Image: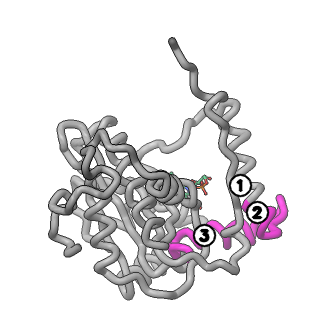
Amino acid sequence: MTPDAEPTDRPEPSFLSGGGRGGTPSSSTVAAVDAAITSRHSIRAYLPTPVPRSAVEEILAVAARAPSGTNTQPWKVHVLTGASRAGLSAALCAAYDDPEEARRHTEEYAYYPTQWASPYIERRRKVGWDLYGLLGIGKTDKARMHAQHRRNYEFFSAPVGLIFTIDRVMQQGSWLDYGMFLQNIMVAARARGLDTCPQAAFTPFHRIIAQHLKLSADEMVVCGMSLGHADPGAVENSLVTERVPPSGFARFHD
Ligand SMILES: Cc1cc2nc3c(=O)[nH]c(=O)nc-3n(C[C@H](O)[C@H](O)[C@H](O)COP(=O)(O)O)c2cc1C
């Protein structure tokens, strides 16, 4: 598919043909869609294998089929490779490594609550310690924790770094739309054998990002994302996170 082609121009997928949207998906279709979703994990170490620009364009074109309130499509994506990715990473790492400088950078929006509550705080702690446990980082090993968090700013060595922005005039609903777009990118990447890690770690450093990417004043940094080929030998990529089953979060009202 060329980047400019509308995915809607394509013929209906086989599981929709004949019966249209009412057609019964084949079990292989169900398995393929489910596998693209469930095989997505946050990948925190990548091989240097490049990702062709055409693949990124195709993923973004598919992802842009995400729904959005009144079709507002509030996403803006900055795709960083090569020198631009390296330049931004170097600037972010320098700021992160300098405690005084790092303190001067704060988020523009609150991703997390200021007052943590159960069960979220326990889940948050668990994933953190599970990751550090795999990497052999102890609870008092601040230097290695710093080094691991710093990997965020190198896009975990992924060849493609994505920075997502939103127009400041857009409201909470558009952030909901944005999440669907981000998930579409991650699932479409999986369908192509690629991996991702969504990253809020970039948000405190929005001023550095704005300077490097020459963002307009109305663009606000939402998050970043690494995209590439997972390094199968990296222990951090073996992290499998838990999920509460539907019985723990869904109530059926008959
Ligand atoms: C919007 C968003 C921001 C995130 N930011 C980071 C980040 O900055 N660094 C990181 O290593 N992981 C980040 N994560 C990954 C989460 O830790 C991860 O999704 C969660 O632990 C569940 O694991 P899984 O993605 O492997 O299923 C982020 C996830 C989301 C959705």
The label nearer to you, 2 versus 3, is 3
Label 3 SS = loop
Q: Residue at 47%, 62% (x, y): give it.
A: 202
Badge 2, how many Cα within 10 Å: few under 14, some, many 20+? some
**Left of 189 or right of it: where is 38?**
right
Q: Residue at 52%, 71% (x, y): give it.
A: 153
On the image, numbered disc 3 is attached to which residue? 44
Magenta residue span: 131-156
The reply to whether the C-beta atoms of the residues labelled 2 and 3 are less than 8 Å apart is: no
* Numbered mark located on residue 128 in the image: 1
* First along the sequence among labels 2 and 3: 3
Instruction: Judge whether residue 43 can be spotted in this image.
Output: yes
On the image, numbered disc 2 is attached to which residue? 132
Asked where in the image residue 232 lies, by quadrant, the reply is bottom right
* Numbered mark located on residue 39 in the image: none
Separation of residues labelled 3 and 1 (CA atoms):
13 Å
The reply to whether the magenta stretch includes residue 96 is no
Q: Residue at 28%, 42% (x, y): give it.
A: 21
Q: Is residue 193 above or below residue 76?
A: below
Q: Amino acid at mark 3?
A: Arg
> Is disc 3's CB within 8 Å of ligand 1?
yes
Separation of residues labelled 1 and 2 (CA atoms):
6 Å
